[in-house]
Image (cartoon, rainbow, N blue to C red):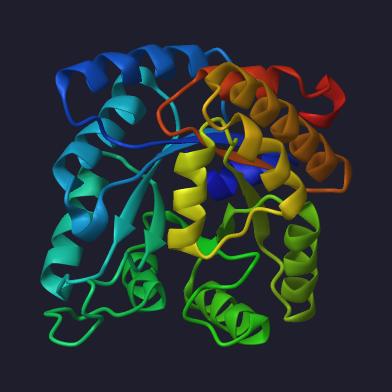
Amino acid sequence: MRISEIFEYHNKTFSFEFFPPRNYQSILELGINVGQLLKLSPSFVSVTYGAGGSTQELSFDLVDYIQNKIGLTTMAHYTCINANKSKVEQDLEYLIVRKIENLMLLRGDLPAEGSDGLDSDFLHASDLIPIARSLDAFSIGAAGYPEGHQESRNMDEDVKWMKYKIDQGADFIITQMFFDNDLYFDFVERARKANITKRIIPGIMPITNYKQINKFTKMSGATIPDAIVQKFEPVQDDPKTMYRIGVELAIEQCIDLLKRGAPGLHFYTLNKSRATVDIYSSIPHGLST
């Protein structure tokens, strides 16, 4: 089923993101975690792949398995950096043959030297979206940035580019992680003023490993509020306390988002189920339906 069709029947969606395992141990761990999260009956799941498509084959295999063997609606991430049109068309046809109907289309990370010298027909996700849309085979997701993309000069420019992705054929937006809900709602308000009417689903990343998440934020341009930093700095070498605080904060964040009208939640699981299960199970039933 296409995710855009799921929206027709559900005011809120709850979804989980995985990445393909890289060794035997992580294959076992992923299997256990997928099994745990299946019990939550997610609306859909998504599967990423590495920078430059470095794990593309593994990613496509995992998408195929979850969609066609387990039976969950599955969205394949696809990045276009350093790809030519012929390869993109071949990859999309591969997914169509495997009955994959949902795509998260992204540019992908630029190499350290930037875009100079790239052998690519695509420099932005907005270049890729029309190709996928023309096939009339996919529901298409695109990324949103509540704090602005690192390459945007300001939020107005950032929203302008998001509007362009919608105009090119994106069906919905999933946001980058954030830890201040006001940033999300300000972002949604800016989008509505720009005549963006599609769903903007908040992306949630629980802080269960402060050092790891802090590293992610520095890479992505997201920020952790000082009040949250002060909670984690003293306990960053105490995994149990860090986990407890991270889950409590994520529960508060999720409940507040849903009470204020967010159309669901998309959990960046980092291939771990415990935190997501604990968080989702603590959301009052009335807010998750």
x, y (%) of residue 192? 77, 72
Report the side of 164 relative to 19 (left or right).
right
* 273 is higher (above) or lower (below) than 201: above
The residue positioned farthest toward the front in the image shown: 234
Report the side of 111 relative to 72 (left or right).
left
Between 167 and 175, the one nearer to me in the picture:
175
* 216 is higher (above) or lower (below) than 66: below
x, y (%) of residue 17? 45, 37
x, y (%) of residue 41? 57, 20
For image coordinates 20% across by 34% down, the residue present is 61
x, y (%) of residue 205? 57, 41
Q: Report how many numbered discs are placed on residues in the image.
A: 0
Between 95 and 34, the one nearer to me in the picture:
34
On the question of residue 36 being in view, the answer is: yes
* 273 is higher (above) or lower (below) than 55: above
For image coordinates 17% across by 71% down, the residue present is 82
For image coordinates 31% across by 72% down, the residue present is 131
For image coordinates 71% across by 44% down, the residue present is 230
Between 7 and 113, the one nearer to me in the picture:
113
On the question of residue 41 being in view, the answer is: no
Q: Quadrant of the C terminus?
A: top right
